Amino acid sequence: MGWAIALHGGAGDIPVSLPPERRQPREEALRHCLQIGVEALKANMPPLDVVELVVRELENIPHFNAGRGSVLTNKGTVEMEASIMDGSTKKCGAVSGLKTVVNAISLARLVMEKTPHVYLAFDGAEEFAKEQGVKTVDSSHFITAENIERLQQAKEANRVQIDYTQPIQNGKKEEVPIANGDSQIGTVGCVAVDSDGNLASATSTGGLVNKMIGRIGDSPIIGAGTYANELCAVSATGKGEAILRATVARDVAALMEFKGVPLKEAANYVVHERTPKGTVGLVAVSASGEVAMPYNTTGMFRACATEDGYSEVAIWSAS
């Protein structure tokens, strides 16, 4: 037994040729957020508080597709979504369609703690945010120049687009080969376990570039993008539709619960055997402090640390 934490900043066709100016700020952000989480766990902060704290920080960093860096819909607007879950109580909260809330993950937690419901969306979620006095800003706060450019590229290519796609060169639309002409990615998440085996998971996203207004992905769906119970905590990332169809987060927990499969084996099976290649990655921790971070995409922005001193920040596989 021992504490452990893992976080991600999205999985997808992240080219190994990703230029340093796009790669390094994200690696530094992962390192920074990991340190915040590790210090919180060492200070005996409950895992639910830890995952909210870390995801809030990730939402505030414009290099990731959540909060401040959220990608734009086909109408050039933001619609943010998030969910959070406590493993020991199975309590959870989720939100979608947010346009003005600075930290979607904290509103999701308020839904969990201050309402009889699990999930609030769009106008109802915004109204609840005002009632709770959470920080809101004009929606222009979330719209970055980089995301305006990404939306333009996606519209020119007439597709829903990956948020790590390289800029189009000389009008050629050959940034990243994507088998189905669609694209994946766009999430931040964190899972944590304390030395008593208490678990929690949190996930937040802006969704897909050029997504239809009103589209909801896996991140706010309990059992798809986020899940925690007494055995494990899971946060998924990638192509939301594929993750929803595969109930990715719950399936990892179900293999452990019903088959007695260890965390790494369960996570690898779900990612590599049960979801289409190029669509998903996840981070997970078990009650005993194991960590798993499998993905079937080119890469996944990820980081983890455990009480025994192990620490990792990575994008691609070592091989």
Image: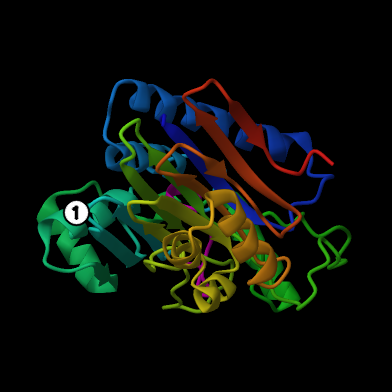
* Position of residue 152 in the picture relative to residue 87 (left or right): right
Q: Which residue is located at x 55 percent, y 35 percent?
A: 304
Q: Is residue 210 above or below residue 141?
A: below
Q: Is residue 116 above or below residue 213?
A: above
Main SS, magenta residues: loop
- Residue 208 in the image: x percent, y percent? 56, 67
Q: Which residues are magenta?
A: 66-77
- Name the residue that disc number 1 marks: 110
Q: Which residue is located at x 17 percent, y 69 percent?
A: 117
- Residue 70 in the image: x percent, y percent? 49, 55
Colour scheme in the image?
Answer: rainbow
Examine the image and state in which quarter residue 46 appears. top left
Q: Is residue 230 visible?
A: yes
Q: Nearer the viewer, residue 293 or 131?
A: 293
- Residue 144 in the image: x percent, y percent? 53, 50
Q: Which corner quadrant holds the N terminus? A: top left
Q: Which residue is located at x 44 percent, y 66 percent?
A: 258
